[in-house]
Image (cartoon, rainbow, N blue to C red):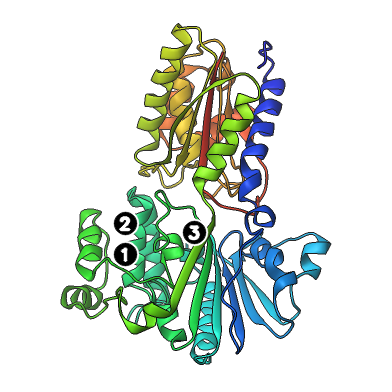
Amino acid sequence: MHKTSNPESIKAFLRSIYSQALAPALPANALLGHNWPRVSGRIFVLSVGKAAAQMMAAIGPHLPNDADGLIVTRQGFAPLETAQMQSIPGNIELVEAAHPVPDNAGADAAQRALASADQLGKDDLLLVLMSGGASALMPAPIEGLTLTAKQKITKALLHSGAPIDQMNIVRKHLSAIKGGRLAQRAYPASTHMIAISDIPGDDMGMIGSGPTMADASTCADALAIIDRYAIAIPDSIRTHLETGHFETPKPGTPPMEKVSAELCAKPADMCEAARAAVTAHGYETFMLGDALEGDAVKLGQEQAKLALHYAAQKRKVALISGGEATVAIRNFEGRGGRCSTYLLACALALEGAHQITAIAADSDGIDGSEDNAGAFLWPDILQAMGGKQSAQSFLDNDNSYLAFEKADALHITGPSGTNVNDLRIILVG
């Protein structure tokens, strides 16, 4: 696309591709044409996750005037345009809670959601709008587990490098709301979920740890993950997992037979939109997968090697991938996320190769716990970081954010209004 090596021009182009890629996953677009079961009774709408406010705004004009509801979203993710705010019925409450480590505001919201589910009857509907981040935003610790203990377990899981699906299996079995338990509480009312997937493979039982979905995993599975990653849990909780006392609702049980669910946006939609955007600029595209997991550093190194392969052939190529890599934290004071870690490893492996640029960014606008969505890469970026040795030191100390900050290469967008996992694009030529 660009013959220029000007970083500002490169960043502007990559920002444009990122925006085009996100468009189909934005709730205003994603929820078009989606509906829910009609009931003769009441509707309680629970919208939870990083896209919760935007999802509620998208369906607001189609809700009955007497619908009750609750929005639970991450702090700072609630601001909406005036028209969006006006579309939400006035009796729907908004709660902002902490993420990724849960807090009291989220815990109180979870109890309100459970209490509302308890009040529903057989002619009523629990309508759940689900997006990524919900696992942390609505904590309801299982009996015998305090919120403080749940917070410690969550932190340990986040630092362990465990894949999101394994983290969510543990969360389900230590929660009074996840793993189908919210739908169980709403029964005999019907439950319908419309979800934006941030889960590799789009398993709807894993989105937000599946509060309305039957759970096929077991207490034994949760305990095996806890032991694999050496997660400390109270002895009493271990005993309840060992005996199966904390088992979740399973497929085929009566409450689960009144549950339905559908996806309105998924990582593949974002990756396909990215493919269309770069194809329009003459790139030959290679889709590496929309559900890639594994170590962020290794992923960056592998994809850099592939980019060098095509560069040697003098081909104009775009390498596109989605999914959620992991970072095993070594420096707990470090600053970085999985996208910036991936991209820094990629930059080091490329060693300044000409005509290779890249972007890696989380679709929700936040890479880990920092204020950036991700970062940009261009041929001379290692020099802007202070040289290869300096860049390697940033990577070794989990400070990828600081490396890209020094190079003026952070991609800062603010909350996007959706969450379909990470987008990685490497452009060759």
Assess whether mark 3 and mark 1 are in contact (beta carbons under 8 angstroms).
no
Q: Is residue 375 above or below residue 113?
A: above
Give how far across and how far down residue 352 sits, in percent. 51, 13
**Horizontal and vertical percent for residue 104?**
52, 75
Query: Looking at the image, which is closer to me, 312 or 102?
Result: 312
Disc on the earlier residue, 3 or 2: 3
Residue 33, above or below 329: below
Residue under pointer 2: 166
Q: Which residue is mark 1?
A: 170
x and y percentages locating residue 305 in the rendered image: 39, 19
In three-dimensional space, the C-alpha distance between marks 3 and 2, rounded to whole angstroms, equals 16 Å
- Image marks 1 and 2: residues in contact by CB distance under 8 Å: yes
Q: Amino acid at mark 2?
A: Gln
Closer to us: 272 or 143: 272
C-alpha span from label 1 to label 2: 7 Å
Name the image quarter holding residue 409: top right
Could you tell me the amino acid type at mark 3?
Pro
Q: Is residue 324 visible?
A: yes
Task: Between residue 252 and residue 367, name the one nearer to us.
Answer: 252
Which amino acid type corresponds to the residue marked 1 in the rendered image?
A: Val
Distance CA(mark 1)–CA(mark 3): 15 Å
Q: For residue 78, which quarter of the picture?
A: bottom right
Label 2: which secondary element:
helix
Secondary structure of the residue carrying tag 3 is: loop
* Mark in the foreground, 1 or 3: 1
Residue at 63% from the left image edge and 54% from the top image edge = 30
For the N terminus, the image quarter is top right
Question: Residue 315's x, y, as percent?
Answer: 51, 11
Residue 100 numbered mark, or none: 3
